[in-house]
Amino acid sequence: MSVTDFFVPRSLDEALSLLAERGSDLLVMGGGTVMMRMVNDGLLFPRQAMSLRRAGLDGVRSANNRVEIGATTSIARLSQLDAVPLLAQAARLFGGPAIRHMATVGGNLFVPQPAGDMAVPLLALDAEVELASVKKRRRARLDAFLAGQSARADDELLTAIHVPVAAGRSAYLRMGRREANTPSIVAVAVRVLTAKDGTCTEARIALGAARLYAMRASQAEAALVGRRLDASSIDEAAQMAMGECDPFTDALASAWYRRKMVGVHVRRALEQVVN
Amino acid sequence: MKQLGIVGQSVKRRDGVGHVTGQTQYVDDVFYPNMLWLQMVRSPVARGKIRRIDTSRAEAMPGVAAVITAQDVPNNWYTILCLIGIEPNDEPVLAHEEVMYEGEPICAVVAETEDIAREAAAQILLDLDIEEQPPVLDVEYAIRPEAPAIKKWGNNTFMYDGMNHRRLRFGDVEAGFAQADYIVEGTYQLSPIEHAPIETHVCVVKPEPDGRLTVHTNTQALYFTMDNTAIILKVPSNRLRMIGGTVGGGFGGKVDVITEPITCIAAMKTRRPVKWRWSREEEFRYSSTRAAVKMEYKDGVMKDGRIVARKVRSLQDAGAYHRHSPYGVQKHMANLPGPYNIPNVWVDAYCVYTNRQPSSAMRGFGVTEASFAIEVQMDRIARTIGMDPWEIRLINAYRNGQMRPVRKIVEDATLVETLQAAAQLVGHELPEHLRAMSSDDYHGRDER
Amino acid sequence: MATITVTFQLNGKTTALAVEPLTTLRTALREHLHLHATKAGCGQGGCGSCTVLVDGEPILSCLLPVALVEGQSVTTLEGIGGPGELHPLQAAFYDHFAAQCGYCTSGMILAAKALLDRNPTPSREEIMEALSGNLCRCTGYLPIIEAIEDAARQMEAVV
Amino acid sequence: MTIHRGRGIASVNYPTGMNLGGDPSQALIFCQPTGGFSVKLASTDLGQGLKTVIGQIAAETLGVPLDMVVIDTGDTDSAPHCMGTFASRGTHRIGNAVIMAAKEAKKALLEVAAEELEAAPEDLVVADGEVYVKGMPSRKKSVFDVALAAHFKHGKTISGRGIFMKPKSPIDPETGACDPDSTEAHATTVADVEVDDETGEVRVVRLSSAYEVGRQVNPEMVRGQIVGGSVMGMAHALMETVFPYYPSLEHHTGSFSEYIIPTAMDVPEIQSVVLEYPSSNGPYGVKGVGEMTANSPIPAIVNAIYDAVGVWITDLPVTPEKVLRALEQKAAGN
């Protein structure tokens, strides 16, 4: 009755063929930190499973002002990624050291909030995800992917994340119930571009643990564009973010508190960018 | 104090090398050839009537060696503190008619591997037919007459000598309040917490050729566990040999006799060694907790800081069954007045049952909760009357020779001395009259 | 019952074993190879008591299928020192009373070893960060932190 | 944002042993032919260090070096009854039982030694593994030689039985009069905290404690209890609950992701002093320092929060959410 097959494909093609052959009964894992926990806890009883750890999907490549991050690149590797400081900073605040070595960035994009932290900096960086099946390859905007509008089909695998080398200043703040290695009460990534006169020309505000999936606070972003980043515009953006988020209650915090913390941390992140 | 030889020396731990090399043997490190694994099927609801337990599909699964239900338990109804006179037996080893909390054990699966046992247990859960009933969760509601009685004796409190609470009566508390310059009140609430030792509950039982059972257990109390297990199994205690003594953290969480009886029955039924290791989820959700306790304090205080009356009402949420709570509430009662000299005291302490995982022993239970309430209350008093928090404690701290509300003479008080030492440690300068105080400065009559 | 064969370096020795396909490294170590220093504290990745080193990096062996360490090098507490030949970290944990119940100790020492191998002179903050995936319920952590600081000094002095 | 600092204190008592007593523990000691002593206990070491401190107490009483004493715990086939390891009773109860057993074994040892040394037993002392005549240190025999002689020449046992029990106190149902404890240890803890008035987060900066625990058998292990208890107490105060919305069953926790306990990164500065006022009934004056160390930090932290921001959070755990709600209510004038 236990697992009869555990596949460790050596290439993407091999992985995709296995998936095409076996369909959605095949449990797919990246780093396995979520799936193996569910197996251990008796929440999943898979008959067949596949790990992508050896499928050649890890690694980081830079070209044409874009960084391509393989789906199974570890969080530990991202924490050393100087080319994308916002991502590196978020990676350093993720889990504990061992989890960072095991968890993969692609896998984490499938993890529900409040544990799917890596989506937050990636949203602020306008990342795209690349998906492949035996038939085709496609790219999707990360926000659409997370919101389920461009979700993974049963025969697809997430293969890479494409991050434009982003201009502007950025900050990442994350709050939990203890200092480290704990799910988020809220995570906030902000990135802003300003003109010479200090006017904000572009703003990205991404929120984790503020909705069932990581989200952009687009009304808050709009509140900044065209204005100087000062106490009043920052306050307004924080208020907008509180209004447009849709937080949930769990063991760590109530929706009421999460909404409050969205406001506080959006403001603090923007203040950090300004100073 | 006389200087001694080896007592007083910081010699290294005897188990230290074993611990740092990983060679200390804990219960989970015990393996026998041909050993089976046990998994529990637990109630999915907080309160309900069991309509049907169907184990047939699970029993037919390859690798399942046995399923154990209430019928396999010789003395299914028990309470662990029967050994110190707590009664009646109120808890089934395995539920068969009704369930009283989410996670209550219903039946056990024994299988060739842990995975198979887990999957078979999940199957039985799917095949289980339970009629859910509304749970009683709030202690204030539970003690009201209109609340449904979840205990067989017809109400929701433990009965102490025919009363639904333990009480302390010392002096005349109403006269104390009448005399007081201030009345200070406060309500204090703790929520249930888990011991969370890194080692979960584990038990390994090996049937021996002579008919005895060798029980490897991480209980904090070997004989207590052995005697309770023997009662449940209806065998003489000498049929059992308990081996333990090395435990990966307990904090009071491993005194409930919660793994050994079932693992023994599984080993007897299959005639094979059996291991039962609790998952972390079981540990959090289904092992007993520290109780939630609600305490209401009302103190009468004089302008000079003397507390002249203290009235306390305390409700302990015992969860579904006794476990150690009836004992804990008695200890709680004795400690609710605090280490202070108060001439008029009134305490009512209730042990209340709800449809929640049972609470039981945990590090300092009975006292931890009281100390929390008392010490915040002391600061409230200090703030109310405008007195320094050090002084309010020092002038009320009990002294050797005084009578405590339980009518025991204080003989080894050092509260004053720890206050003085703590002030010194943090560089807080106490005024001369407080530095001059001592736990021995009471001389047979109350000069205050 | 399906089985797979896995070969890897375990504490410096080539080791091969046949197990069910999704067997975790923790189960392989504890139940097949009978190396019991590695503990089963939660199976959820939450406590760190199953921490071992794979190619020198700390991982949680409860969440790693053993199939994935094929060809890699695994170090457990048994592999770094034993009675009479304690690793400096083990000696320091002993000297500083850094193990009380002992159940987190293996994971703690290996997490610390991964740190010191990479950073022989860590600050206290770096030590605390390196331990952030390992829970201890007994010691309050300070004796563990002090032991690691002491071990780092001892190991530096030898170098 | 403002970070507010505050300080709070709390003083606690802690009773040693089971409430009302009636909780016996036994020990058996026997000497092996070459002078090693085996102490048989059905007691449990769950990390607090029982095997170590009981070894120290046995060696002290017998007068032999620590490494001549083996502590064997945890087998009901070979050890007599012990009520268990809980209620801060281990060192007190089991220590007393071991002293009683060790005295009996020592008496037997001295009787054999008296014959060997041609002296009266009451004139003999045991120290550092040797038996000698008081005032005549050269007239001596090693415990090794005495044990050999006992076994193979005199045919005598060197062994001892010990038990300690405080008789169970009755309790008066009307007044609650009872004798609930054997002895009381005491402590005062000072908590220094910082509170963030925008998030309600509380950071414990420092816990400073003065403990009075009777005689310390092993000071480093007493410190171990104080440090460990300080952190557990801090966690009880600020982090822990299995029912985050008690009395509701919603969001019942099932893992260390939901049930928060501190990691090494959450640990405050911890300092302590220990006073020793020996108890009259504990082994060598021991009171005990097991459970109590987690108690005093809880109210000290709650009081420090009031000192910092002027709100009483009397519903544990003190989550940042509860602090923030209280601050908002205070600001609204409620």
Image (cartoon, coloured by chain):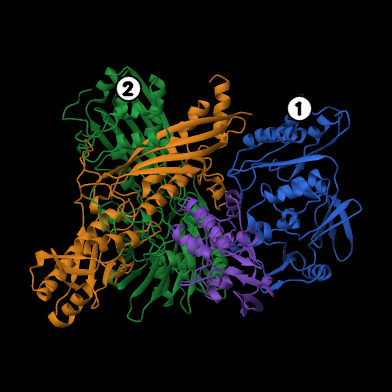
Instruction: Using the image, determine if residue D187 lies above or below residue B6.
Output: above
Between circles 1 and 2, the one closer to the viewer is 2
Using residue D162 as the reference point, say whether residue D73 is left or right of it. right
For disc 2, the neighbor class at 10 Å (few under 14, some 14 to 19, many from 20) is: many
Quarter that holds the C terminus of chain B: top left
Q: Colour of chain D?
A: orange
For disc 1, the neighbor class at 10 Å (few under 14, some 14 to 19, many from 20) is: some
Q: Which mark is residue A59?
A: none
Residue A240, image x, y percentages: 75, 30
Instruction: Using the image, determine if residue B236 lies above or below residue B135.
Output: below
Please name the residue that numbered disc 2 is placed on.
B305
For image coordinates 75% across by 68% down, the residue present is A54
Q: Colour of chain B?
A: green
Q: Colour of chain C?
A: purple
Q: Nearer the viewer, residue B78 or D3?
A: D3
Residue C41, image x, y percentages: 52, 61
Instruction: Using the image, determine if residue B256 lies above or below residue D249.
Output: below
Using residue B166 as the reference point, say whether residue D312 is left or right of it. right
Say whether residue B153 is visible.
Answer: no
Where on the picture, by quarter, is residue D323?
top right
